[in-house]
Amino acid sequence: MFEDRSKFLILHVRDNLKDVARESLDAIVAFMSVHRRAFWWFGHWVFIDLETGDPYSEELHRERKAECDKANKECDKANKEYKKLMDDRVDAGLEETILDEPGSWAIPAKSCHWILIHEPQVKDDSTRYTMNKQMELLDDQEPARVQWNTCASDEDRIKHLTESIR
């Protein structure tokens, strides 16, 4: 996830940035690297149906719950530290538009839940939804989830920005 992140600026030119912005970008990327597991947890929630009596699902749920319980402390700490880092950088003169760059990860206020499409649910042609199709539908419904990495055009890349930033 970290290696595949956007590594370019689309709203700014690095050479035109003030020193505080360049230093802030370096600090933000370093923080994202150190806490990449916490960022993964912030954005990945899959619900497991325990009512089916499926032993695999039950074991997967136990493993995920144990890992999630452990990660919650790490996530809480990372969330507080990231907020402080951002606040400190903005107070030092960082333009907030830098935080709208696709390479500056944002911690979502709400998790983007992904609920698997139930097997009996079929498309109009009576075929089932593939995993790739489910992800495509989710990306269309929740574009912030993909952090702009899959945009097909510049228009797609900026359509979710506020008018003042465009």
Image (cartoon, grey):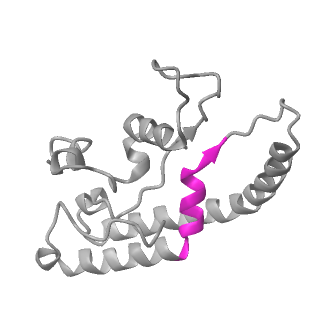
Q: Which one is in front, 10 or 107?
A: 10
Kindly indicate the quadrant of the structure image that contains residue 105: bottom left
Residue 32 seen in the figure: yes
Is residue 40 found inside the magenta-colored segment of the image?
Answer: yes
Name the residue at 54% across, 61% down.
Answer: 39
The correct choice, above or below, for 53 with respect to 7 in the image is above
Q: Which one is in front, 56 or 4?
A: 56
As drawn, the residue found furthest toward the left would be 16
Name the residue at 57% across, 39% down.
Answer: 113
Kindly indicate the quadrant of the structure image that contains residue 23: bottom left
Residue 52 at x, y percent in the picture: 83, 31
The correct choice, above or below, for 127 with respect to 153 in the image is above
In the rendered structure, the answer to whether residue 60 lies left or right of residue 110 reads right
Q: Which one is in front, 41 or 90?
A: 41
The correct choice, above or below, for 51 with respect to 8 in the image is above
Is residue 29 found inside the magenta-colored segment of the image?
Answer: no
Q: Main secondary structure of the magenta part?
A: helix
